[in-house]
Amino acid sequence: WWARSGLIVGNATPDLSARARELWGRSVPKHPLASAGEAIDDGDFLAAEKLLDSWHPDSANDASIKAILQTVAASGRGDFNRAIVIGLAASAEHPEGSGNALRTAEALLSRGHHGGSNLPSDDFTRAFELAIKARDSRRKWRGDSVAAILTAVKAAALSGDINLAWALTQQAPTGTALAHEVADSRLRREAAIIGAATGRLEAALELAQTLEDPFVEATVRGWKAYDADQPQEAKAAWLGAYSCAPDDVTRLQTASALAHLGLGLPDLGSISDDYS
């Protein structure tokens, strides 16, 4: 029970990671799920894979969780092919579960975006399908459908269909999101950035004002200046956004916007080699 509880908490933030490790620490004797969760949290993906490979679960639910962690561990090592094979098999075997579908979608996006794919567009399309499958599954039991939508948004954007990405963040009749989903700050954040980048500035500005997120605010302000043909103001705003970007993905997105200006780029040396 403690092992599963830690996995539910996850490690999306340092606080959650600390809470998960506290729960795993209560697993006595240590369950393989707890040990694997700790190894993944430590970035020791090979150790996690060895632990999982030696564990033979006796229930369908545990088998599904094992496959999710195997997918995460393989992706963490950069072996996206292995992650996708495991994830697709588990998703087919446990169609009622959303975790395998979503983790496989993320692995497909990584393979298509970072290399190793013969047909990136096919990976993005399949990732979109799996993310929507996970979204619809989670809606049935009021699970975290927003996490699945964010993956679908990324898949749509990488496929070049930015209007579809926008629609995923909007409520009917404009889009396909539900009321509680569009109220989620994660989806509003994504909508603000997509809206600004696609000329929907009024909507983007309104969203940015409600989020109190300096990265989003600076990003939207930059697109507003860019739209008004004020390159120096856009540069200043986007450099500000780059300085407070929460991760390498958003830093690269901001650098890409700056590149359109032709006025120089920030120092990209801090970005992980995984994105080179």
Image: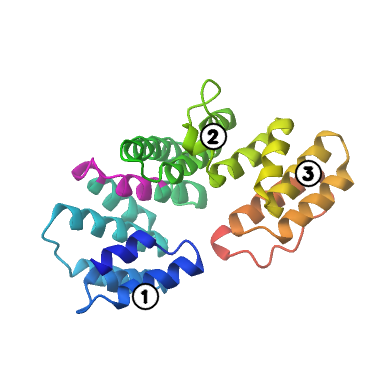
Residue 74 seen in the figure? no
Location of mark 1 (residue):
22
Q: Is residue 217 above or below residue 137?
A: below
Rounded to the nearest angstrom, the CA distance separating label 2 from label 3 is 20 Å
Q: Nearer the viewer, mark 1 or mark 2?
A: 1
Along the line of sight, the residue nearer the viewer: 20 or 115: 20
- The label number, if any, that marks residue 169 in the structure image: 2
Along the line of sight, the residue nearer the viewer: 11 or 78: 11
Residue 255 seen in the figure? yes
Q: Is residue 248 left or right of residue 97?
A: right
Q: How far from the left and from the top, in percent, is residue 58?
A: 10, 60
Q: Amino acid at mark 2?
A: Thr
Q: Is residue 228 above or below residue 263?
A: above
Q: How far from the left and from the top, in percent, is residue 183?
A: 54, 39
Q: Amino acid at mark 3?
A: Arg
Magenta residues (range): 91-105
Location of mark 3 (residue):
221
Question: Most prominent secondary structure in the magenta stretch?
Answer: helix
Rounded to the nearest angstrom, the CA distance separating label 3 from label 1 is 41 Å
Tell me the quadrant of the picture where the C terminus can be found.
bottom right
Which structural element holds mark 3? helix
Q: Amino acid at mark 1?
A: Glu
Extreme residue in the left direction: 58
Which residue is at a point 87% across and 43% down the rendered structure image?
231
Q: How far from the left and from the top, in percent, is residue 220?
A: 73, 43
Which structural element holds mark 1? helix
- Judge the density around disc 1: few (<14), some (14-19), many (≥20) Cα neighbours within 10 Å: few
